[in-house]
Amino acid sequence: MYSRFFASLPVEIPVPEQPVPIQHYLRQPQRLVSALVDPSRTEKLSPDCFRLKMRPLNFLMLSVQPTVDMKVWAEANGTVHLRSRRCEIRGVEYINQRFSLDLVGHLEPRTENGKTTLYGRANLEVKVEMPPPLWFTPQPIIDATGNTLLTSVLHTIKQRLTRHLIADYRSWAGQERQQQRQNTTLQLSPNAQSS
């Protein structure tokens, strides 16, 4: 018995004004992934691909722990795209062999009247063949439980993104500004000595 679950969630995050535009920050996939997922559960596979170990999820009487390989890339204007590449379920081998996960998302900076806001959306779809113990569970219960679970996963990601992304951006912008000042001082110092 195959089931399909789906959830979609919009994101809107006001961006505080900083000395370095957020578009520069968004071009660094590693920082964005760290804002989305606890760095202790992230492994960098390549400059734009990351393995994310999600927290265990409880679905009816099952407990599963998805591990997702995620491609993250940015356009020149700072728009960031996320796409799952591969998924493995740890905990229940039966489900691992009969499971697919598709996560697609984007985050786009838009500036109006001098104020920048990040707009985005994440879509999460899971297809899975239910193990025999769940075959007698009514389909509406399975569907409602699965869709609610995916929605809660997206809400957790959204909350983490909202809290951590802006805090990390502020910290990064401050470091970049300090680095720019140091570079300017280093460039000026030989001239100061020669005069």
Image (cartoon, rainbow, N blue to C red):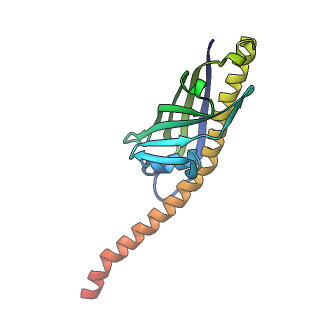
Quadrant the N terminus occupies: top right
Front one among 122 and 38: 38
Residue 137 image offset from top left, x and y in percent: 75, 14
How many discs appear? 0
Residue 83 image offset from top left, x and y in percent: 47, 32
Horizontally, residue 61 falls left or right of residue 155, namely right
115 above or below 176?
A: above
14 above or below 97?
A: below
Residue 26 image offset from top left, x and y in percent: 46, 47
Tell me which residue sits at (46%, 68%) in the image.
Answer: 178
Front one among 38 and 155: 38
Q: Quadrant of residue 134?
A: top right
Q: Quadrant of residue 5?
A: top right
Quadrant the C terminus occupies: bottom left
Tell me which residue sits at (42%, 51%) in the image.
Answer: 24
Residue 20 image offset from top left, x and y in percent: 46, 56
116 above or below 124?
A: below
Name the residue at the left extreme. 194
Q: Is residue 195 visible?
A: no
Tell me which residue sits at (62%, 25%) in the image.
Answer: 7
Q: Is residue 31 visible?
A: yes
70 above or below 168?
A: above
